[in-house]
Amino acid sequence: MTQIAFTKGHGTGNDFVIIADPEGELDLTDEQVAALCDRHFGIGADGLLRVVRSARLAEAAAALAEQPDAEWFMDYRNADGSKAEMCGNGVRVFAHYLLESGFAELAAGATLPVGTRAGVREVRRADGGYQVDIGRWRAEPGDPLVTARGLSVARPGLGIDVGNPHVVVALASDAELDGLDLSVKPVIEPAPPRGANVEFVVPREPLVKDGVGRVRMRVYERGVGETLSCGTGITATALAVRDWAGRGAPDTWEVEVPGGTLGVRMFPAEDGEHVALSGAAALVYSGTVELA
């Protein structure tokens, strides 16, 4: 048995076990990650964030090539131990941990580059927390159908990739959204090759208020299940609803999830349109745990 230090953190209820491994000395198996994230026999979390220097991890080579200043790499693992490309809430919590632990500094107006499997993500301070540039996005081809417990018939979805894959499904009412049973994994047909997070969304009334779009959302995450919040899912949802709303739809959105409300903003960049996510990040407690 090996004893390791950890910190528990969350972004609007999307919670993580954070393990500092600056020199890349830990080689956690899927089973070890799943045990740490187990809510009954472990610490409990939606995923695990390993804090490692990019130079110490072969997987981070692409991130370093993209941005040599990306000293830190977010090795994100889902609750079942599987690797994931990106996590919007996780990046904010990761950056908050770096700053609070003294691993990094972030001056006013500056950005902190964080390496991920989906590329480098730039984080800056924002009102109430942090804003992360999720980067470019793309709509996926095809017309997936989603079946979920609580829906009488399969519903069409829109595939959105924001570094990791999502399928966003529009529902007719709050009652439909609240009546979903997401203890059972939704089925996507045809099945995406890498799987996908599935977001179910309804508009607020009115949809646009003071120039800001407003929606409610629930999400089923790959390798996790239903979570209180999903940062990349929130950005995918805002992008999908803007597309459905058509010409004149706003580029600024508020997305309400069970864990709170986050902001999404679409903006032009040199390489195309980017989407940014803003919200809170918190560290809850630290301790040590025996790792089998």
Image (cartoon, helix red, strand yellow):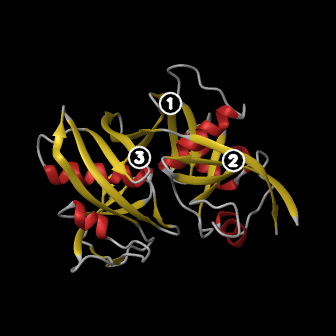
Give x and y (percent) for residue 18: 67, 50
Which callout, 3 or 2, points at the residue further toward the start of the chain? Answer: 2
Q: Quadrant of the N terminus?
A: bottom right
| Callout 1 amino acid | Arg
Q: Are marks 3 and 2 in contact (CB under 8 Å)?
A: no
The disc label shown at residue 240, or none: none
Q: Quadrant of residue 39?
A: bottom right
Q: CA distance from mark 3 to mark 2?
A: 26 Å
Crowding near pointer 2: few (<14 within 10 Å), some, many (20+)? many
Give x and y (percent) for residue 47: 59, 59
Circle 2 residue: 51
The disc label shown at residue 260, or none: 3
Circle 1 residue: 124
Give x and y (percent) for residue 255: 32, 47
Residue 272 makes an appearance in the image: no
| Callout 3 amino acid | Gly
Q: Are marks 2 and 1 in contact (CB under 8 Å)?
A: no
Taking the image as shown, residue 287 lies to the left or right of residue 163, namely right
Which callout, 3 or 1, points at the residue further toward the start of the chain? Answer: 1
- Indicate the secondary structure of the residue bearing disc 2: strand
Q: Residue at x 51, y 35 (%)?
A: 123
Q: 84 above or below 256? A: below
Q: Quadrant of the C terminus?
A: bottom right
| Callout 2 amino acid | Val
Taking the image as shown, residue 116 lies to the left or right of residue 127, namely right
Q: CA distance from mark 2 to mark 1?
A: 18 Å
Q: Between residues 134 and 261, which one lies in front from this camera angle?
A: 261
Taking the image as shown, residue 15 lies to the left or right of residue 220, namely right
Q: Between residues 126 and 21, which one lies in front from this camera angle?
A: 126
Q: Residue at x 23, y 65 (%)?
A: 175
